[in-house]
Image: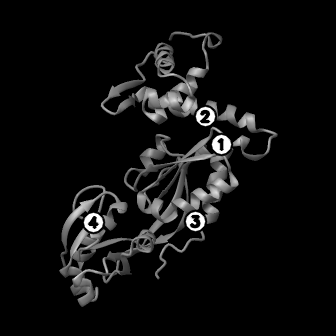
Amino acid sequence: MKQINISKIDLNVLKIFEALYEEGGASRAGLRLAITQSAVSAALNRLRTIYGDQLFTRTGRGLAPTSRAHELKPIISDALNKFRQSLGMGSHGESGYLGRSVLIGMSDDYEIAIGKVLLNAINKRMPGLRLALRQTHSQIALEMVMRRETDLTITSGGLSSPLVSREALGEGGYACLIDPGSANTKSKALDLGGYLDRKHILISSGGFIGVVDEVLAALGHQRHVLASTTHFSALPFLLKGTDAVATMPTHAAHQIAQMTGLKMVRCPVSMPRYPIELGWLKSALRDPIVAEVKTIAMELLAKKNWNKFG
């Protein structure tokens, strides 16, 4: 194995590696660090020599990290974060948080329901810290935690691993969203018959079968799924002016109804409840910044009413 003398390396290239990884392009990394794109490209060439790998490959949308870069990212960021932490020792105010970011994984139903409250609390108690909200869901949340693509993750289960810690935030349920101005809504209550008569918008990471379909099948019923979307935030645009219905987590339905004029109603089918958990790689809390964000999140979210109506 080739031995490299660290005294001959400009350690600023590690900051450039981190910026390239997180921003996905040389020009954006340059803007973040207030250096020229040519300086970023020169640093990338030095990084490739140091690590004996391309590290980033060009795509139509910028630079994509190689598998080697994925392995290096948590190590390099940990080292940089230790240095940032040392700069804040013995100081007060926001200086201990400047330049730091924490990655929080959650699907957009949680972003809609709790994102603003969480951002406000962290901005108040940890000024200067930036949050990066990363899209995830229960089927991929564990993989993202294990690959250290998120520091903390809020998800509806799926975090079973001896390397991952988790704490319960509560239990979630389901509600329906409809447009109260549609003709069908005005003339018919959302009982089981009306529910089955309507066309449905499914929120799913893939396919046209969801938990609602499984529950209905057990009762001998079937619904008509008109369309499927991966984003809860698209629902106001898909439901407005139609008589379609969407069945979704109550926490997001409540927030969307408040903001858009859609109406949240109780689901006429008895749906199973599901766990809402905060999870993290056990080693992540060695970073006091991540540990502090975790504490704030627990204080806020363990008290939340996840099934609020009205």
User: Is 181 located above or below residue 140 in the figure?
Assistant: below
Q: Quadrant of residue 231?
A: bottom left
Q: Quadrant of residue 225?
A: bottom left
Give the crowd class for mark 3: few <14, some 14-19, many >=20 residues within 10 Å.
Answer: some
The answer to the question of whether label 1 and label 2 lie on touching residues, with beta carbons closer than 8 A, is yes
Cα gap from disc 1 to disc 4, whole angstroms: 42 Å
Amino acid type of the residue tagged 3 in the rendering: Leu
Going from the N terminus, do you reach mark 2 or mark 3 first? 2
Cα gap from disc 4 to disc 2, whole angstroms: 43 Å
- Secondary structure, mark 4, is helix
Identify which residue is drawn at 32% across, 72% down.
247
Going from the N terminus, do you reach mark 1 or mark 2 first? 2
Q: Which residue is mark 4?
A: 238
Residue 239 location, x and y as percent? 28, 70
Cα gap from disc 1 to disc 2, whole angstroms: 8 Å
Q: Which residue is mark 2?
A: 78
Residue 196 location, x and y as percent? 20, 80
Residue 146 location, x and y as percent? 47, 43
Residue 301: numbered disc: 3
Which residue lies most toward the right here? 90
Cα gap from disc 2 to disc 3, whole angstroms: 27 Å
Q: Is residue 106 left or right of residue 191?
A: right
Residue 188 visible to the viewer:
no
Identify which residue is drawn at 63% across, 55% down.
122
Residue 231 visible to the viewer:
yes
Going from the N terminus, do you reach mark 3 or mark 1 first? 1
Going from the N terminus, do you reach mark 1 or mark 4 first? 4
Q: Which residue is mark 1?
A: 287
Q: Viewer-proximal residue, 114 or 291?
A: 114
Q: Viewer-proximal residue, 297 or 272?
A: 297
Amino acid type of the residue tagged 2 in the rendering: Asp
